[in-house]
Image (cartoon, rainbow, N blue to C red):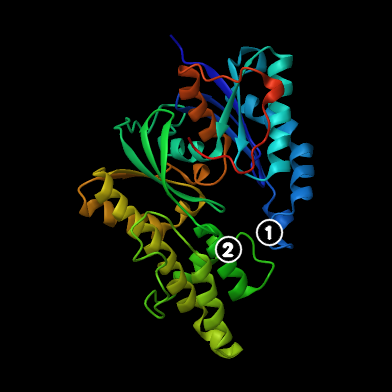
Amino acid sequence: MNKPLILAIDTSCDETSVAVTQGRRVLSNERYSQILMHTKWGGVVPNLAKRAHEEQIDQVVESALKKARTRLDVIDFIAVTFGPGLAIALGVGIDKAKELAKKHDKKLIAVNHMEGHIYSCFVQNAAGNPENEFRFPYIALLVSGAHTELVLFKNHIDYEVIGETLDDAAGEALDKAARMLLGSNVYPGGPVVEQLAKKGNPEFIQFPRPMLSSKNLNFSYSGLKTALLYYLKGQSKAAQNKQIHDVAASFQEAVFDSLLMKLNQAIKKCSINNIVLGGGVVANARLRLKARQLVKKHGGTVLFPPSKNFYGDNAAMIGVAAYYKAEKNLFVSNMETLDRSARARLS
């Protein structure tokens, strides 16, 4: 029996994304990026993001169907991100998903964006590669622009958050660092810091490793950002320019060390060494290298999204997560009550 075809929509922030999936296989994954539009503002402008989603979503839906060589009338289910994310952006995707589900008499599946990032590590291409069979349980480290979480992934659609940021997320800290180093109109900042850091010495400055002595698995990055601010204030402009690569490398190393110290604690505490890393920040090659080195010491395995298309926000991961929700009959019972949830939590 063929697995259901799912049309998935994600408008959680600044990417209008629509995918067609079948089980874990991604038949299409189309995106319209708003990055260039928001760059001059140094971050996402909510009303501009909403307008761009509204202008682009129909053509992205059409493109995803065309790329997958299918039609809405043969799609089995519609899936959509309901949160967390930017509220007015989420609303555009939800409204479109409801419209399509009603018009074509399809069941609707609501997906948490963070569970999508977990399942991004298991997506396959149209031919079913890579295979990456599930070996539960896992510890998931999720590192996106606005979220930093450690999650027990016990089984399909069965999660327990065991650690999270108390203030800023790791991605936000990297974005802020980029603006401190290069100016207010840098967006997104993480990739910029990564490029600077490649030419720098990560041991140039010993920035603090947040939450190092805490017994829990939570994260914090506001103090680390303050440490960078004070360091830069103590340097002349000429010194800042001369040191920019070393400062970027040192700051990035502190962020990643703090992530992996908590992951190390979680591995020991939970006696689980099957690890998945998802979220946009995981696109950073340095973070992936350090994660591999850590997990290898524990004799475990670590999975990342299989290509750059699945690190950031994308609808393919939403479609794959939706498949496992459909298997458990976790459909939206009343479309009228489905609403955006900007601060939705995994549960």
Task: Please provide percent x and percent y for residue 33.
Answer: 66, 46
Picture residue at 44% right of the left edge, 69% below the top: 198
Quarter of the figure with residue 63: top right
> For the residue labelled by badge 1, is the local secondary structure a helix, a strand or a loop?
loop
> For the residue labelled by badge 2, is the local secondary structure a helix, a strand or a loop?
helix
Quarter of the figure with residue 45: bottom right
Decide if residue 133 is on the left or right side of residue 233: left
Q: Is residue 20 above or below residue 84?
A: above
Q: Is residue 79 above or below residue 183?
A: above
Picture residue at 44% right of the left edge, 39% below the top: 118
Quarter of the figure with residue 82: top right
In primary-sequence order, the first of circles 1 and 2 is 1
Identify the residue under disc 1: 43
Report if residue 161 is visible in the image: yes
Identify the residue under disc 2: 175
Quadrant (top left/top right/bottom left/bottom right) for the N terminus: top left
Task: Determine whether label 1 and label 2 are within 8 Å by CB.
Answer: yes
Amino acid type, callout 2: Asp
Task: Please provide percent x and percent y for residue 246.
Answer: 45, 78
